[in-house]
Image (spheres, helix red, strand yellow):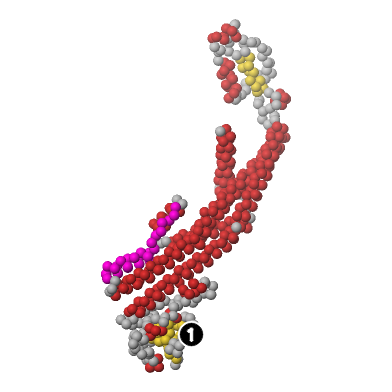
């Protein structure tokens, strides 16, 4: 217990010293040890990395889970080290409502059939979204959280230790500076006379007569007694107790007499009132002690600075790791959007095939232009990104003769311009080969599969897939 109390007192003293040094630095009353420019750049880079990582992590969580209450629930489960329960995505919930509505409104009606088809597509979209959220959380969010909760906390701890070592170093410098100034002042005052007491108090007790000194100077002087001398006078002038009165004073007690004896320099020096040599030795010892403390503080500061520098330089490897995780996140996001595009394209084909006779050309021009496939993506991603070429069998209704393209004329409603997105090779003589980025004239005919259009380029004419075109206004 005694050891703990001593340690507590020592820690309190160190904390107070650091607080005083920090306050004086803030007010500009103390010197501060500055770090080198490279170290300051490392600190600024680490702070910037931490701040932007927090913002990216927070916004990615909002992207994956827009519901704030759901994010809070997941955070609590994570802190309690419990498994997050499976949650239905918005697409899956919408699919469930559409399926129930179709069942209640009549699955045999056109509206009910469409609801069922859309619900199936939304269910697939919800499953794709669930896979995307799971993959992004593992490959992207988890590494960011590990950096903030692991590596960054270690860096922050070492930076606090470095700050304390710097305060201790600056406090030792200030202590050494004050000790050297006091030593120089004591050395300079060695040749200057020091004021000494001008008189001493001499007590003469009548009960024990003794020789009273013969004063050569009878002039009255105003002497000011110290507190200890005044207390001595009060205690001595007070009569003793009755029990000791007869024992120590058989002839009766009388108040004592007091005299002030002036001191000469020789008497003062003989009595040791001047202690310049002792003061100089004391300050020399203080300077030696301060220098020793400064050397120890400098060594600890240099060691801690090196440890912190190594941790800060490790931020570069953190950037490399985050770059790899970012590529994984983009890959999973690309797969998710490609799957969504494929599901919606299939849904569009189903709805267009079932309603093409009633609403001819309903879906012409509604397909958003897709990005060309990247060579760096996986085969699965590339297959999902490439437009799906519809079958040619839907060009003419069953039982009718095939259309003669030479006899086809543009409709009265007019034509539109379209930009070709990808190269397309004609499968037969009824199709028109396409080159990327060229402009052609397109139009639709009643009864055609909405996934196909008639394209014209100069005097050439043929069927072209809608998914390879971007219709221009």
Along the line of sight, the residue nearer the viewer: 96 or 274 = 96
Quarter holding the C terminus is: bottom left
- Give the x, y percent position of residue 352: 35, 79
Label 1: few (<14), some or many (≥20) within 10 Å? few
Q: Residue furthest top?
A: 251
Give the structural element (helix, strand or loop) at label 1.
loop
Q: Residue furthest left?
A: 105
Q: Is residue 458 above or below residue 466?
A: below
- Give the x, y percent position of residue 349: 38, 77
Count of numbered circles on the image: 1
> Residue at the location (42% across, 71% down)?
340
Q: Quadrant of residue 16?
A: top right
> Residue at the location (68% across, 16% down)?
213
- Give the x, y percent position of residue 304: 62, 49
Q: Specify start and end residues of the magenta stretch as a single range.
A: 82-106
Whether residue 191 appears in this view of the structure is yes
> Residue at the location (45% across, 68% down)?
336
Whether residue 79 appears in this view of the structure is no
Secondary structure predominantly adopted by residues drawn in magenta: helix
Q: Which residue is mark 1?
A: 425
Q: Is residue 438 above or below residue 330?
A: below
């Amino acid at each position: 217990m005694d050891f703990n109390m001593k340690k507590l007192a020592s820690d309190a003293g160190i904390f107070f010293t650091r607080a005083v040094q920090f306050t004086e630095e803030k007010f500009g009353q103390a010197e501060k040890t500055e770090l080198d420019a490279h170290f300051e750049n490392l600190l600024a880079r680490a702070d910037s990395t931490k701040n932007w990582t927090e913002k990216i992590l927070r916004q990615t969580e909002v992207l994956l889970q827009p519901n704030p209450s759901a994010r809070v629930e997941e955070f609590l489960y994570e802190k309690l080290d419990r498994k997050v329960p499976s949650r239905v995505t918005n697409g899956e919930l919408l699919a469930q409502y559409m399926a129930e509505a179709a069942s209640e409104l009549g699955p045999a009606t056109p509206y009910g059939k469409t609801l069922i088809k859309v619900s199936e597509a939304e269910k697939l979209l919800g499953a794709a979204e669930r896979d995307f959220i799971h993959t992004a959380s593992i490959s992207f969010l988890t590494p960011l959280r590990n950096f903030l909760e692991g590596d960054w906390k270690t860096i922050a701890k070492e930076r606090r230790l470095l700050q304390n070592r710097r305060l201790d170093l600056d406090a030792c410098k200030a202590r050494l500076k004050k000790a050297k100034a006091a030593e120089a002042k004591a050395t300079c005052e060695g040749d200057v006379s020091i004021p000494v007491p001008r008189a001493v108090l001499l007590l003469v007790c009548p009960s024990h007569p003794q020789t009273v000194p013969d004063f050569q100077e009878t002039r009255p002087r105003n002497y000011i007694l110290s507190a200890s001398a005044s207390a001595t006078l009060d205690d001595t002038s007070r009569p003793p107790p009755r029990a000791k009165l007869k024992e120590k004073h058989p002839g009766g007690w009388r108040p004592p007499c007091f005299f002030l004896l002036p001191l000469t320099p020789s008497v003062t020096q003989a009595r040791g009132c001047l202690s310049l040599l002792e003061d100089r030795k004391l300050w020399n010892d203080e300077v030696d002690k301060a220098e020793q403390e400064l050397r120890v503080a400098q060594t600890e500061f240099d060691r801690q600075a090196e440890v912190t520098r190594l941790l800060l330089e490790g931020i570069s490897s953190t950037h490399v790791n985050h770059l790899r995780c970012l590529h994984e996140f983009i890959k999973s996001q690309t797969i998710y959007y490609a799957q969504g595009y494929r599901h919606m394209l299939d849904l569009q084909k189903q709805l267009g095939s079932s309603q093409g006779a009633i609403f001819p050309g309903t879906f012409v021009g509604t397909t958003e232009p897709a990005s060309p496939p990247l060579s760096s993506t996986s085969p699965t991603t590339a297959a999902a990104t490439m437009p799906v070429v519809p079958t040619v069998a839907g060009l003419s209704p069953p039982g009718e003769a095939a259309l003669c393209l030479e006899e086809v004329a543009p409709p009265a409603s007019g034509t539109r311009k379209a930009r070709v997105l990808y190269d397309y090779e004609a499968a037969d003589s009824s199709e028109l080969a396409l080159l990327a980025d060229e402009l052609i004239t397109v139009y639709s005919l009643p009864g055609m599969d909405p996934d196909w259009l008639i394209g014209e380029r100069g005097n050439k004419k043929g069927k072209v897939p809608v998914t390879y075109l971007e219709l221009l206004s």
